[in-house]
Image (cartoon, rainbow, N blue to C red):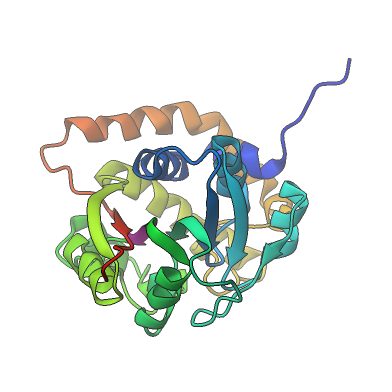
Amino acid sequence: MQAHHLPWQIEMFRRSIKKQQKLRALLDMLGETTGKKCLLITCGDNNGALNWHFRKHGGEWTWVDVSGENNDQISMLLSEPVYSFKEDNFPVPSEHFDYVISIDVLEHLGQDQPFLKELRRVLKPSGKAVVTVPNGDEKLLANKIKWRLGMTPDVYGHTRAGYTVSELSDALRKSGLEPKDTGGYSRFLTEMIELAINFGYVRALAKRHGGAQPGHIAPVSAGELKTHGLAYRAYSLLFPIIRAISLLDSLLPVRTNNAVIVSARKEDHV
């Protein structure tokens, strides 16, 4: 009998500590989605694995990527269409979705309010928005280390470093959404593991093969993964050790999250 192989996106996800933490934190914040109309919006750094897991969680999903660069591959994985929306004009009727999830989009935009106001418009009354961004606090040790190594926001394709919890909450409130809950993921050791992977890809592996595409900090296509197959196999062998190191985050005295999540409601009276 021939062995069953999962899609390469799902195999990669199983070896990504930060993305697994992201999914768990988002599902905890999101809650039950069965029978609900849900919209997931990403921006380039997405190969479809998160979409795949959200669909398993339940609900009727619509998939959107603002950049549109990986839509074909995500669509092949899901066997469903993936759309590209302009950041300030969603071609969707008002009050259409029960939930809207925006994953790491705002830091790519020049202005956040046009996007957030569209996000609010397509939510039903009392609908929930869940938004993730990098923690842009310049005092964070992880940020200081990344920037010192040259892994500045522009390398990640960002227009800004990110948002603190209060900054993201303020931005949501300004758009007419009322923040209800906050959270995050990726503490110091996990963030340093992710930095080492991204630094190795951008500064070494991708450079050796002609350079990484702007904003690409890890393989996002089957072709890119095949190009760096030997390095990926080595990483896979080391993954149990890497995962064990990340678990030590729970022992650190400072437990600041390097990625921020805020959920907000569309209040009926707003």
Residue 217 at least partly seen: no
Along the line of sight, which residue is nearer the eye, 209 or 63? 63
Asked whether residue 52 is drawn in magenta, I would say no
The quadrant in which the N terminus is found is top right
Residue 190 at x, y percent in the picture = 34, 43
- Res 72 → quadrant: bottom right
In the depicted structure, whether residue 187 falls above or below residue 200:
above
Instruction: Name the residue furthest left.
Output: 253
Along the line of sight, which residue is nearer the eye, 19 or 112? 112
Instruction: Name the residue furthest front.
Output: 269
Residue 266 at least partly seen: yes
In the depicted structure, whether residue 116 falls above or below residue 208:
below
In the depicted structure, whether residue 126 falls above or below residue 28:
below
Residue 94 at x, y percent in the picture = 51, 72
Along the line of sight, which residue is nearer the eye, 45 or 180? 180
- Res 199 → quadrant: bottom left
Magenta stretch bounds: 129-133
- Would you say 190 lies left or right of 102 here? left
